[in-house]
Amino acid sequence: MAERTGTARRSPLNRDRVLRVAVALADESGIEGLSMRKLAQELGVVPMALYKHVANKEELLDGMVDAVVGGIGDPPDGAGWKDAVRNRILSARSALRGHAWALQALRSRTRPTPAVLAYLDSVIGTFRAGGLSLDLTHHAMHALGSRVLGFTQELYDAPPPQAGPPEPGPSAEESAAVAARYPHVTELARSVAHDRESVVGQGCDDQFEFEFALDLLLDGFEKLHGQGWTSAKAGGTRS
């Protein structure tokens, strides 16, 4: 467990320690296995003692998200805006992937937490310091979407694992009918070796696909910046 009996349990209770132990518990058993009662037990205190530091479980989750996002590394000194943004986003991806529960918790927040706002502010600031206009920066952040925090919402997420024996696959006749009806999907699906661990589709390398799309976006932003692009010139409207 996150903390054991002894000196660690006798150390003073504060918000930092509460969040640190909550993160460790979530790493062990996921968000579903985390409760205020279980957290209090691990800390060696009564549940009511926690409420001096976090008002409820939602505030606890906010703090846990901030603890993870606050650990995202800074880009190296002297990096250009494109390298700095790339480094920052890949650092965010690494930080979130280090805690399997973090993405679920982040998606469940109804508003950005302070650490998330600080992170987004730093990314926007990097674009602006690199000379990108406010207009282009605005649309760049829209284009990046959730990718700015290191994850993407794929067209079809992988289905959750099912208990019991796997369902039988389609018959040869059914596969042939699907291939005839959807030839381009079938051609693409058959062009890669299957990898059941990928969330972007069997045969896909998640990290490669993430960096491939990220680099396309950053190259596009750089090109538009060099062209003096504005949404007005492109005939767009602000959103």
Image (cartoon, rainbow, N blue to C red):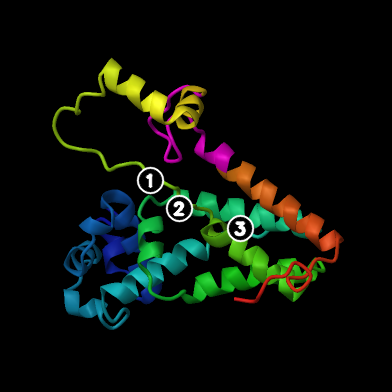
Q: Main secondary structure of the magenta part?
A: loop
Given the image, on which type of amino acid does mark 1 rest? Asp
Vertical comparison of 178 with 121: above or below: above
Q: Identify the magenta region.
A: 192-209
State the residue at coordinates (63%, 49%).
214
| Structural crowding at the residue carrying mark 2, measured as other residues with C-alpha within 10 Å and reported as few (<14), some (14–19) or many (≥20) | few
Residue 157: mark in rendering:
1
Mark 3 and mark 1 lie on one chain; the one further toward the N terminus is 3
Contact check, label 1 and label 2, Cβ < 8 Å:
yes
Q: Which mark is residue 47?
A: none
Q: Which residue is mark 2?
A: 153
Residue at horizontal 40%, vertical 24%?
A: 179
Residue 26's x, y, as percent?
31, 56
Q: Residues within 10 Å of mark 1 (few under 14, many from 20)?
A: few
Outermost residue toward the top in this view: 172
Name the spot of residue 19 as percent of width and height, x first. Answer: 36, 68
Describe the element under mark 2 as helix, strand or loop. loop
The residue that disc 3 covers is: 73
